[in-house]
Structure formats: structure tokens, C-alpha cells
Image: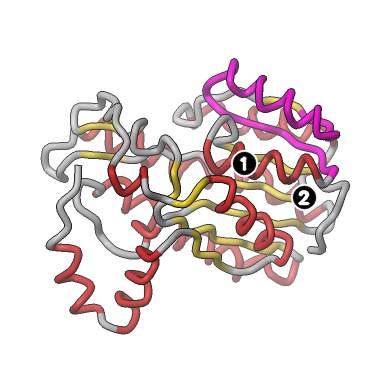
């Protein structure tokens, strides 16, 4: 897919962070946007800025953990402009609790938002996307989807699962002009650690030191948007922490030793 000024792009997790930053780039290019997030007030602010940048922009507030509502949500998204060229599954929630200590309801909520919501939206959207001549599915995963990470058991599981599902979608529908872009961030300075769930489901409410030192969301967004237009199978976004992806690939034993020594909150 070539960079365009008239594509229809649906972004989840669009009220802040990577999703918000990508929305502004897409808007400045002249694309049509559909923005989804849980905070309607903030979503309206992002919408207005996109309009100021020259884009047509609709908002679709939603709690993606309510998976039974996602077919209707997808139908509404399709109704705005008649099709969707790029679906950016970016919404997600992280975790800060040990595996056994984390209540199962927290595990389920994380899996619903991070994995089952993108899966259900894709199942509903894909036939329409194929009928319209194809399209791109961009999916925000994480380096935590490459290796287990302390206090992130459900989060890492959801990100591992995204790779399995969407790489399979790519294989199955490649000949029908469906392309998948796996977006793999390391440390990006967003509120993801602040909004992470503790073992009992309460909000973590603090930014991790590593997150605070991450690259700006705007820098990450520029690389992500470029990768989406080029339809790259995967794009790694972050700093030196991305080296762990290659250490895990080529020196798995060393990677396991490094991860065991990580102390995090």
C-alpha cells in the first residue's frame, strides 16, 4: 500500500500515546479517521486536532473489554465511510503483578482488551475489507510478546497470542491482498505503566522509570506510520532495550538469564 491522502483508517487506543500521535500524522496526510478510546472527552480533543489538520474524523468511544458489543462497534465503524483500508489495533492495557497473585478477573480483562478484542473486530471486519479490495491490519504487540517479563504474565501472554493469530491471518489471506504489520514497541514514553493493572485490579498509577526514559510517542509514531504504508511484516520501535529481541533469537539461554535478573515495579 502506497502512502495516500485518502485512506480510511480506524485506530483503537487513539485518545493518547502512540494511537494519538499516529492519528495526527495520518490526519496531516489527508486521510479519513475513525478514533476509538474509552475516554470520550479526550477522544473529542484528538478528533478536533485531526479536523484542524484537515482530516475528516469520526469518534467511536468504546470499552473493548465488552467483547459482546464489538460486532456492533465494527459495523458502526464501517458505516462512517463505507469501508476501512487500515485497521490499527493499538488499544492495550498492561499489568504489574506476579502470576499467582494476579486475580483471574484481571487476567481475563487484559486478555479481552489486548487479544480477544482485536480478534473479534478482525473476524467481523475482514470480509468487508476483502470485498473492498484488501487492506492492512496493523497490530501493536510488545517486546513482552517476545519473551516472558516479570509482573507481566497476562500482558505477555496477550502479546504472544497476537503474534500467533495475526501471523496466521497473514498466511491465510495474503492472496486476497490482506497485509499484516506487527508493531513491536519497547520503551515508549506513554501512560501505559500508569494505567497498568495491579494484581487486585487497581490502577498502578505511576510511571515506571524505564517508561519515563522511553522514546517520545511522536518519534515512535513516525516510524510506525512509515511501516504501515510500506506494509512491513514487523516494525520494532524503541531504544537499546530492543537488543533483547535479538539476544532471545540468537542466544536464548543468555536472554533467560538476563530476564531473571530484571527488577521492576
User: In the picture, which quadrant includes the C terminus?
Assistant: top left
Q: Where are the magenta residues, as a range?
A: 30-57
Measuring from the top left, give residue 90's x and y in whole percent.
54, 44
Please identify the residue farthest to the top as the structure is shown: 41
Viewer-nearest residue: 97 or 262: 262
Determine the image quadrant of residue 252: bottom left
Please identify the residue farthest to the front as the structure is shown: 213
Query: In the figure, is residue 199 to the left or right of 27?
Result: left
Measuring from the top left, give residue 242's x and y in whole percent.
39, 66
In the rendered view, tell whether residue 171 sits above or below residue 105: below
Q: Residue at x 80, y 28 (%)?
A: 51
Q: Was residue 95 drawn as part of the magenta stretch in this picture?
A: no
Residue 166 seen in the current view = yes
Query: In the figure, is residue 84 to the left or right of 54?
Result: left
Within 10 angstroms of label 1, few (less than 14), some, or many (20 or more) residues?
A: many
Q: Secondary structure at mark 2?
A: loop
Within 10 angstroms of label 2, few (less than 14), some, or many (20 or more) residues?
A: many
Q: Residue at x 59, y 69 (%)?
A: 233
Q: Which mark is residue 21?
A: 1
Measuring from the top left, give residue 178's x and y in whole percent.
71, 62
Disc 2/disc 1 C-alpha distance (Å): 19 Å
Q: Was residue 43 drawn as part of the magenta stretch in this picture?
A: yes
Viewer-nearest residue: 34 or 124: 34
Circle nearer the N terminus (2, 1): 1
Q: Residue at x 19, y 48 (%)?
A: 264
In the rendered view, tell whether residue 218 sits above or below residue 168: above
Give the foreground label among 2 and 1. 1
* Residue pointed to by mark 2: 85
Residue 161 seen in the current view = no
Amino acid at each position: 500500500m502506497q502512502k495516500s491522502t485518502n485512506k480510511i483508517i480506524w485506530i483503537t487506543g487513539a485518545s493518547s500515546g502512540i494511537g494519538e500521535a499516529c492519528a495526527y500524522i495520518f490526519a496531516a496526510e489527508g486521510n479519513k479517521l475513525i478514533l476509538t478510546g474509552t475516554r470520550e472527552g479526550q477522544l473529542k480533543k484528538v478528533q478536533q486536532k485531526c479536523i484542524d489538520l484537515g482530516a475528516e474524523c469520526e469518534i467511536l468511544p468504546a470499552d473493548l473489554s465488552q467483547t459482546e458489543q464489538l460486532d456492533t462497534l465494527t459495523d458502526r465503524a464501517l458505516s462512517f465511510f463505507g469501508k476501512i483500508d487500515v485497521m490499527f489495533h493499538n488499544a492495550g492495557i498492561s499489568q504489574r503483578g506476579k502470576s499467582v497473585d494476579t486475580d483471574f478477573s484481571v487476567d481475563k480483562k487484559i486478555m479481552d482488551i489486548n487479544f480477544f478484542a482485536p480478534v473479534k473486530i478482525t473476524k467481523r471486519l475482514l470480509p468487508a475489507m476483502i470485498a473492498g479490495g484488501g487492506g492492512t491490519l496493523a497490530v501493536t504487540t510488545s517486546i513482552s510478546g517476545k519473551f516472558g517479563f516479570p509482573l507481566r504474565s497476562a500482558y505477555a501472554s496477550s502479546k504472544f497470542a497476537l503474534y500467533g493469530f495475526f501471523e496466521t491471518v497473514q498466511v491465510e489471506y495474503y492472496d486476497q491482498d490482506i497485509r499484516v504489520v506487527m508493531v513491536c514497541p519497547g520503551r515508549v514514553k506513554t501512560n501505559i505503566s500508569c494505567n497498568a493493572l495491579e494484581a487486585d485490579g487497581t490502577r498502578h498509577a505511576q510511571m515506571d522509570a524505564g517508561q519515563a526514559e522511553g522514546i517520545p510517542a511522536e518519534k515512535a509514531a513516525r516510524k510506525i506510520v512509515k511501516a504501515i504504508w510500506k506494509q512491513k511484516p514487523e516494525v520494532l520501535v524503541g531504544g537499546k532495550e530492543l537488543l533483547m529481541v535479538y539476544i532471545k533469537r540468537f542466544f536464548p539461554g543468555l536472554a533467560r538469564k538476563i530476564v531473571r535478573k530484571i527488577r521492576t515495579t
